[in-house]
Image: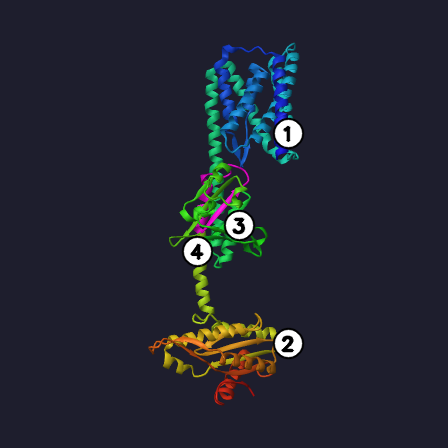
Amino acid sequence: MQKRSGFLLILLFISYLVFVVGSWVLQPSWDWSQWPLFFSLLILQIMTYAYPLVIKQQRVILSLTVTLPLLYTWGMVAELWVTQLAIILATLQNPRRTWQEGAGSLISAGWSSFIAGLVYTEVRNELLHYPFSHINTISSLLLYVLIYLVLSLLIHAFLEQERIRFSHVLFLIPFHFLAIVLSFLLILVIEELGLIGFLFFAVPYLGMVILINTYEENKLANHNLQTLYQTCFRFTSQLERERVLDAVHEAMAQILPGNYYSIHLVDGEQLIQWTGTEDHKSTTVPNGTIRRIPLGKGVVGRVAATSKPMLIYDLFELLSVPEPIEEEAQFRSMVAVPIIGDGKVLGVLSCADSAEFTYRKEHVTYLQILAGQASVALLNAYQFGITERRARYDELTGLFNYRTFLQILTERLESARIEEVPYSLLMIDLDYFKKVNDTYGHLAGNQVLQECARLFKGSLRNPQDVVARYGGEEFVILLNNMEQEEAYLWAEQLRSVIAQTPIQIPSTLQEDGWHSIQITLSIGIATYPIQGQVGSELLRYADRAMYRGAKQEGRNRVAIYA
């Protein structure tokens, strides 16, 4: 970047040196009696560069509309310096353009005007000796246009070090043709009516530019809103939190410009940067690391703390934010809005770009619409998660409930038939549990159930083993790839551990507070495939083994179905 800037400065200095010397050598004689018209054309050229047509988000400058009348009336030197001044003022007026872009435009337009102007001047002087002066003038101007456009294209490609895009050339041809027609019309009305003719031309011309740009802006806004509606519909129909965030991140990248899109979620007094799912990694988090940002720090932290959006135009404004974070300091423009739901901030959506003045107020609006829909989708996903958890898990112990266990059992036995692996099912009953409730109260009974559930879950060998609350004080454990004898030894170890582990419980029926008690287990075992082929059989046989082989034989023991 620094090398390119230095190269542009040297080239610009050499260019202006050549332009000044060339202008002095040519020493044009200007007719200052038409100075009001000259300055009117200067103002029109400045406006042409400052407010170009924007078609399909591409800038189209109809500079030839003013260039040819200037060239025809005052010669190449006047046209050269009017165009240079117009580019300088337009660049200063537009904060989104960098000085490098302005310098490139000055060099490209300057050399194109200078060389094409020299050819035009020489050819026109030669053609003065021939009849059909109007045709000769038109021919000279068209030759100037051809040389000017070709040189502009080549110089721009050289400065930007990119190939000539012929699709872009084809896109611009109709507009250059329009500019040539308008320039000849302007020459005609100026010759006939002078300054009055210029005014008759300039007002409709500027009105045309305004109307076309307004139409294109509305067209782009409608397109963005349609895209916004479609993407919002996609993620509001999602019921999983991670899928919602995936869709929101994708929607931000589709609708908003920039090279950085981020979602931060509030977690207490800090923000956690969302990293994305495996099939949709966030581009904002290097190597999957999680960024934690305190509320009030940096742009996103400030947005979360104040619940207000922020629009950052340039680096100076970005660095003025209190406690800027390193991640944000590498960008030049940024926009961030809060995700608000149920009256509180849920997170922050932010976009950033390496160029200044990328974002405008409409981008804040787009992001606010996304944030509003994202908050609805996240709250829906949260409620769905609660409902789904209640449907799948036992609320007291956090283990799978009976219905979920039956689904898992059916699926595991189907895969066991294919893989030919054994499964052992343990039916577990807490001995004398009713006595705990009667002696210490139901809160104490709940405490026993929760502690036993924790111990059962901690005893599992691997994620393939499953524990669930069967009902009341009964639990079931499904042991993957375990034969009956091995299951018996494992169950004996579990029974022994529980029997030797004191459980602290509160007492609501006695005055002396907390108590330490010990619980014993009665366990029945049934194994697939030797004792049952389907889940209902295994449950029935394990239950029968638990009652007949363990409880009726004195409790606190393990029994295998026979």
Gap between marks 4 and 2, in whole Å?
49 Å
Few, some or many C-alpha atoms within 10 Å of disc 1 (few <14, some 14-19, many ≥20)? few
Q: Where 53 sits versus 444, above or below? A: above
- Most foreground residue, 374 or 354: 354
Q: Where 471 sits versus 215, above or below? A: below
Which amino acid, mark 4?
Gly
The nearer-to-camera label among 3 and 4 is 4
Q: Earlier in the sequence, mark 3 or mark 2?
A: 3
- Residue beneath disc 4: 268
Specify whether residue 364 is painted magenta: yes
Which amino acid, mark 2?
Glu
Query: What element does badge 2 sit on?
Result: loop
- Residue beneath disc 2: 420
The nearer-to-camera label among 4 and 1 is 4
Gap between marks 3 and 4, in whole Å?
26 Å
Residue 250 circle label: 3
Which amino acid, mark 3?
Glu
- Most foreground residue, 62 or 114: 114
Residue 381 in sight from this viewpoint? yes
Q: Which residues are magenta?
A: 347-373
Q: Residue furthest front?
A: 512
